Amino acid sequence: MKPEDYKVKIGSLIQESRQHRGFTQAQLAEALGTSQSAINRIEKGGQNISLEMIARISDVLSHDIMMLNRTGKINFRVRGGSKLSGSIDTKTSKNAAVALLCASLLNHGRTVLRRVARIEEVNRIIEVLQSIGVKVRWLNEDGDLEIIPPKKLHLENMDIKAAKRTRTVIMFLGPLMHQYNHFQLPFAGGCSLGTRTVEPHMTGLRPFGLEVEATTDYYDAKVKLQPVDRAIVLTERGDTVTENVIMAAALHNGTVTIRNASSNYAVQDLCIFLKKLGVKIEGIGTTTLHITGVTHIDKDVEYHPSEDPIEAMSFIAAAVVTNSEITVKRAPIEFLEIELATLAEMGLQFDVSDEYKALNGHTRLVDITIKRSNLTAAKDKLHALPFPGINMDNLPFMGLIATAARGRSMVHDWSYENRAIYFTELTKLNADIELLDPHRVYITGPTKWKPADLVAPPALRPSVVVLLAMLAAPGESILRDVYSINRGYEDFANRLNSLGAHIETVREI
């Protein structure tokens, strides 16, 4: 590897650590007694940096920047077989955060999002926003995030590398189409789960006057705004599709009806946020939305995204697969009720506290205590449905829980082409998995786990499933290249460690 490549990798690690700690470049420069321009050059890999300077930066940020190794990845070393105990707070929703970051482009005023999860997906969108002229900064270590747009976005300066590492960039279509008659967006990236067409987005946005041509490297968007004179019927009840159309309707002069809309948690958060900006929305929590937009938004607003039901489900699965008792606090029960009811039929015992409201004033939260239980296989196949069914992102955790249940369960992951295949990674940890086709597996339990050395799947939820299985496997396991996990979970390893897990993070360059 060339020296220049090492400098870029080190600079990227420093930038990641700085953002995680909530430091601006200027604050880090002041603490080190150097200039902001020097920090900027270091983070871009344009300046030589000594081991002494790396150590000083590590001290200031209270974080080891790196361990010298070979491959440039972040790995987890897991010592499994221990019981978990205690309680854990659920952090705010990843999917809501990225939708709200995109929605901030609708507002010409100052937007403050409270308690945003510091995750790679959020970092990528922040990088994209900053590259086009939006001022984005962490206000404190609590995760409060300030977004101030410029008078005119500089779309020609978009950070293509960051944009290609997240599918969220596709949700720029809705906010931008009322502000520009021609713009381009890079192809969306994210998890490797097979082909996912953007045609459902086009079906929902075309009535506003948007046409998109897919070229080799980007989407070429052309806009001729027109009145929407009929209900928009979405061909796919997807979250991002619904969010894109909602954001387009937010700046539309008139009332737009959206049918077959997703009513999932991130969609509800987006709607509540837009109402604070003056957009009128009826039908939140249903599949039919009536949105009366405003032609211009310039308002200082702050908003608290609600908690993440998928993260809550991750901790529930961690408790079950390790046969432990833990309490998952601040869990959004509306988006977990079907999962818990299904698990109760399989024999899971748990207690649920009285309900209380999230800080957004809308979402219902509870504390869930998972108890040690003897599970039996699901009588019917485990499969996801649009809300209020089992969440598609929770289905992998239902499959993991099936490995602890006596008997054979079928998991049918119909919504993604390749995700069910990732269950076969668990066979390397001694799980009994029978792949029927790209969408269906039989899982037979209970599993007598064994440790293994694995590369994390290139998808978020399957990677977390493998990590949680390693917690149940007595001995030492290695999970390599965990970027997918860091993309969607904040400080996940250390938070599991707070419950009694033993996970060591090993950085390589």
Image (cartoon, grey):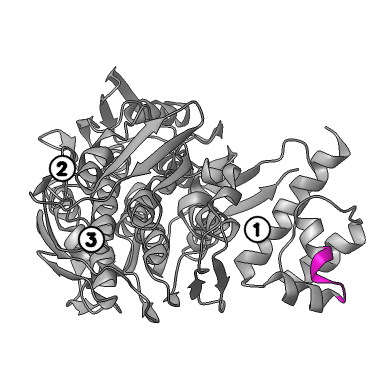
**Element at badge 1?**
helix
Mark 1 — residue?
A: 16
Tell how many labels. Answer: 3
Q: Residue at x 20, y 67 (%)?
A: 351
**Element at badge 3?**
loop
Please tell me which of labels 3 and 2 falls first in the chain: 2
Quadrant in which the N terminus is drawn: top right
Q: Do the residues labelled 3 and 2 touch (CB within 8 Å)?
A: no
Q: What stretch is highlighted in magenta?
A: 33-38
Image position of 283 (left or right of 116): left
What is the three-letter code of the residue carrying label 2?
Leu
Quadrant in which the C terminus is drawn: top right
Mark 1 to mark 3 CA distance (whole Å): 37 Å
What is the three-letter code of the residue carrying label 3?
His
Q: Do the residues labelled 1 and 3 touch (CB within 8 Å)?
A: no
Image position of 15 (left or right of 456): right
Please tell me which of labels 2 and 1 falls first in the chain: 1
Mark 2 — residue?
A: 234
Please tell me which of labels 1 and 3 falls first in the chain: 1
Q: Is residue 494 above or below residue 161?
A: below
Dot in front, 1 or 3: 3
Q: In this view, does 246 lie above or below 506?
A: below
Q: Within 10 angstroms of label 2, few (less than 14), some, or many (20 or more) residues? A: many
**Element at badge 2?**
loop
Q: Nearer the viewer, residue 413 or 397?
A: 413
* 36 is within the stretch colored magenta: yes
Q: Which residue is drawn at 75% across and 73% down?
A: 28
What is the three-letter code of the residue carrying label 1?
Glu
Q: Residue at x 46, y 31 (%)?
A: 429
Mark 2 to mark 1 CA distance (whole Å): 38 Å
Residue 252: mark: 3
Mark 3 to mark 2 CA distance (whole Å): 18 Å
